Image (cartoon, grey):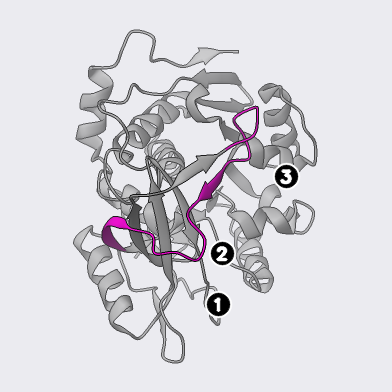
Amino acid sequence: MQYDILAIGDTTIDAFIKLKDARVDCDINDEHCQLCVRFGDKVPYESVEIVPGVGNSANAAVACARLGLKTALRVHIGIDSNGDDCMAAWKRDGVITDLVVREADKKTNYHYVLWYEAERTILIKHEAYAYTFPQLPDPPKWIYLSSLGEGTLPYHQQIADYVSTHSEVKLAFQPGTFQIKLGAETLKDLYAHSEIFFCNKEESQRILNNKESDVKILLAGIRALGPKIAVITDGRKGAYVMTDAGVWSVPMYPDPAPPVSRTGAGDATASTMTAFIAMGMAPQDALLRGVINSASVVQGVGAQKCLLTKIQIEEWYAKRPVDFKATTL
């Protein structure tokens, strides 16, 4: 079986704890914000919502499957009830789970999301799984690689070796915290073979080791590392894409209602754009669809609940404001 998309990364269960009594302290520039609760006291919360089978690559797999692509997921989970819940959630969304690895001596990752207003602070703990690249009788059309935890450098090299020896496979790379920490030099083979690369503005500065504010220079810097298509998101300023054909800016899609939670917004943008490019759409037009799915995702709790189908995205696009378009920079 040939997959349209093979998503690779880590997965977890998120427990969203909606805080009732907290505050956010920021510096004079409204940056470097900290979530504050009373120390050594009982802190009330409003609710808890459990969301299984999430994480950058799992979110991407669900997004692509919901858009109609034949999508498989390669993640590691435990043989436990939490793992069962993840498998059930993916199967409900049509994600192919044949390549999911279940390890008897490991637990399924479980994170706590401190949810205050529309933002979140996440308490994380990753199991040390025995990561291996799957045996694939038929190369997938795309590999979507995202967040993996510490101790996975050999696994990254396996993935790089595969894409370097299978030129017909296109790589979409949306690095997570550890992958950015490793540095572009360490992961140079992955950067060099990336068809499309996603990060936010602050991440691009860390990757390039500079404090450049001009997004065009940052995009060019990312492309110089190897990716053919570079995408940088910049919060409420929207997103930017650079290809051989030019540079485009895409604004945010207006929120239909105040955001509930911003978890998964970046994943929705990146995976949806990748899916539409895989379906033959031009990058700047695909980015518009990604931004639409991002606007939908923040209307619900968790990164997957409000992901749209292809028909729904085109319905949103048909109702777009006149200024919601890709503008050449």
Cα distance in 3D space between marks 3 and 2: 16 Å
Q: Are marks 1 and 2 in contact (CB under 8 Å)?
A: yes
Q: Which residue is mark 2?
A: 148
Instruction: Tell me the quarter of the image containing the N terminus.
Output: bottom left
| Mark positioned earlier in the residue sequence (3 or 2) | 2
Is residue 136 visible in this depiction of the protein? yes
Q: Counting other residues with Cα less than 10 Å from the Cα at mark 3, is it few (<14), some (14-19), or many (20 or more)?
A: many
Tell me where residue 86 appears, x and y as whole percent.
Answer: 30, 70
Residue 207 tag number: 3
Cα distance in 3D space between marks 3 and 1: 25 Å
Query: How many numbered discs sit on the rendered protein?
Result: 3
> Which of 66/161 is in front?
66
Residue 50 part of the magenta segment: yes
Q: Residue furthest front?
A: 41
| Mark 3 residue element | helix
The magenta segment:
26-51
Looking at the rendered structure, the kind of residue marked 2 is Leu
Say above or below: 276 vs 142: above
Looking at the rendered structure, the kind of residue marked 3 is Ile
